Amino acid sequence: MADYDPAIALWKNTEGIGLSEADERHNIESFLRHNAGMSFVAEEDGRLVGAIQCGTDARRGFLHHLAVDRGSRRGGIGRQLVQRSLDALAARGMRKCHIFVIADNLAGRRFWQRIGWEERTTLVVMSHDVGPAAP
């Protein structure tokens, strides 16, 4: 949680990242507590330049909000963050991991394909609100 403010600033300034009330401080704190040791940040010269959230539903792994600062891209930071997350998932016995990519985020889709991820065209994500928004 010590990295929440710089991480949320990075996500807000990264094209293709969609944020919602699920990313408010108390929700991220709960997510990190439930998935301890699975999300990571990257720093250069004491400044946060990359972040990824990783968690599991006890059957599959999920990655959220991989972002690397524009000035630090193309140096392998994104790949390293992904690999650390996949290693954490494997250590918990997960055999598969998913990430949701916004459909018009072409650069993001190219990144994931370039590092070996397959686009699933046989699934459609559907959502339903289960309660009122947090105050």
Image (cartoon, helix red, strand yellow):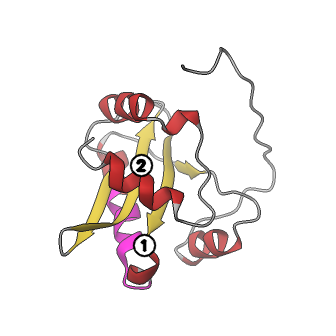
Predominant SS of the magenta segment: helix
Residue 4 on image: x %, y %? 33, 46
Q: Nearer the viewer, mark 2 or mark 1?
A: 1
The residue identified by callout 2 is 53
Asked which quadrant contains residue 127, the reply is top right
The relative height of residue 113 versus residue 98 in the rendered view (above or below) is below
Image-quadrant location for residue 36? top left
Looking at the rendered image, the quarter that the C terminus falls into is: top right
Segment colored magenta? 74-85
The amino acid type found where label 2 is placed reads: Gln
Residue 18 position, x and y percent, is 62, 51
Q: Give SS at disc 2.
A: strand
Q: Tell me if residue 77 comes above or below residue 125 in the rendering.
A: below
Image location (x, y in percent) of residue 38: 32, 45
Q: Which of 12 and 41 is in front in this view?
A: 12
Residue that label 1 marks: 69
Q: Is residue 123 left or right of residue 100?
A: right
Q: How far apart are marks 2 and 1 (CA)?
A: 15 Å
Residue shown at the point (59%, 57%) measured from the top left: 17
